[in-house]
Amino acid sequence: KRVHLIAAARPNFMKVAPLWHALTAAPDFQPVLIHTGQHYDANMSDAIFADLSLPQPDHHLGVGSGSHAEQTGNVMIAYEKIAIAERPDWLVIVGDVNSTLACGLVGTKLRIPTVHLEAGLRSRDRDMPEEINRLAVDAIADVLWTPSPDGDENLLSEGCSPARITNVGNIMMDSFELVRPKIEAAAEPAALGLPERYGVVTLHRPSNVDTPEALTALVEALLAVQATLPLVFPVHPRTAQRLAAAGLDARLEQGGVKLAGPLPYVRFMSLVAGATAAITDSGGIQEETTYLGIPCLTLRENTERPITITQGTNRLVNASTLLEALTEALAQPRSERARPANWDGKTAQRCIDDLRRRGSD
Ligand code: UD1
């Protein structure tokens, strides 16, 4: 069976890689890797492919950045040609980025059986473009692979038939386990000259970085944290543009925050695994810190990943509450809570089992 796998942006690559490897090893499947080109910088794309031992994609659509409509439309136009020419047996789309929606629309209209990996997550915040993508994709995909039981509950409450849903677990943990030896050997904290205790920061959500007011408040909050916990901040290209425009990169550096460019997967996970805490607005880092038992302070009003709060190490904070919440989190003993069910590095195999079961129905 031929399976189209869509990879587009940095957070997609660690969801696609375990499935690509498992499908390649399976005698009855042939994966076809398609990169839409939504992310294109070396450290946002190529270096992560190399870290995850992914080959060059079979197709590269070279779409690049643009407005939401431009990006979504350009991916649709380019992917439709390939989908018509190759007519795969399955299309797998992952996560919640614009390319996920674009390929989901193309695949379902061509009646190609379409699977959404990481289905059912809901922030209930439609100011987040990703939330619109999630709602739209889950409404049309044939099969919904959820990472946690809250995903199943959300889908059922929206009227999805249970037959469409399979809880496969969190595939990000498969990627971590796949390259754990490389992560443990990377010693990134030492390479960056970091002390024993440090915090790792990432920020890229439009709501945090796109207005100078919001960004300035966060920079001040980070500088207050820096006084007690030294920070390292690998900066996303979107955030780099905004920090530079407001002159805030210099202010962070003068305050002692160590700035770096975006890091490839292995180096970045080495940094997270060695950190005392993470401060972030990313979705994936909320999950990875829960998996690793590292306190995570999430600079958002809501999260589509509530299990990282109820069963993990995550807390929602804002610029005013960050320092206090961090102090409180660090004062608590390290969590001994069990990891969420099916966050075990075996999700890709459950995905394949589900494809086989559905293929023979
Ligand atoms: C997109 C995804 C978001 C994901 C994020 C991770 C959507 C709606 N959003 O966000 O869910 O968490 O990616 O990064 O799909 N840029 C570069 N080089 C690159 C990529 C982008 O310089 O390789 C620049 C772009 O020109 C743009 C900015 O960074 O100015 C933002 O790009 P992008 O990463 O795509 O961010 P989002 O669209 O915010």
Image (spheres, helix red, strand yellow):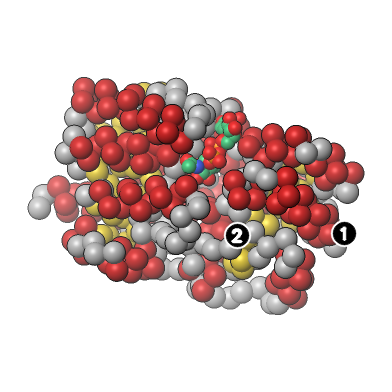
Q: Amino acid at mark 1?
A: Ala
- On the question of residue 101 being in view, the answer is yes
Q: Residue at x 68, y 57 (%)?
A: 279
For this rendering, which residue is in front, 193 or 206? 206
Who's the residue at 73% across and 74% down the image?
Answer: 328
What crowding class fits label 1: few (fewer than 14 Cα within 10 Å), some (14-19), or many (20 or more)? few
Horizontal arrangement in the rendering, residue 125 relative to residue 88 (left or right):
right
Determine which residue is flagged by label 1: 227
Quadrant for residue 122, please give it: bottom left
* Tag 2 residue: 300
Vertical relation: 159 (above or below) 81? below
Residue shown at the point (46%, 48%) measured from the top left: 130
**Residue 178 location (% of width, % of height):** 48, 47
Asked which secondary structure carries label 1, the reply is loop
- Against 359, residue 296 (above or below) is below
**Where residue 61 appears, x then y in whole percent?**
40, 23
Q: Is residue 204 left or right of residue 133?
A: right
Find out if the beta carbon at label 2 lies less than 8 Å from the nearest ligand 1 atom. no
Residue 230 lies, with reference to residue 90, above or below; the image says below
Query: Sequence-wise, which precedes: disc 1 or disc 2?
Result: 1
The residue shown at (24%, 37%) is 107
Ligand number 1: quarter of image: top right
Answer with left or right where residue 327 lies relative to residue 285.
right
Measured as percent of width and height from the top left, residue 229 is found at: 81, 60
Taking the image as drawn, is residue 183 in sight?
no
Kindly indicate the quadrant of the structure image that contains residue 72. Answer: top left
* CA–CA distance in space, label 1 to label 2: 23 Å
Q: What's the amino acid at mark 2?
A: Arg
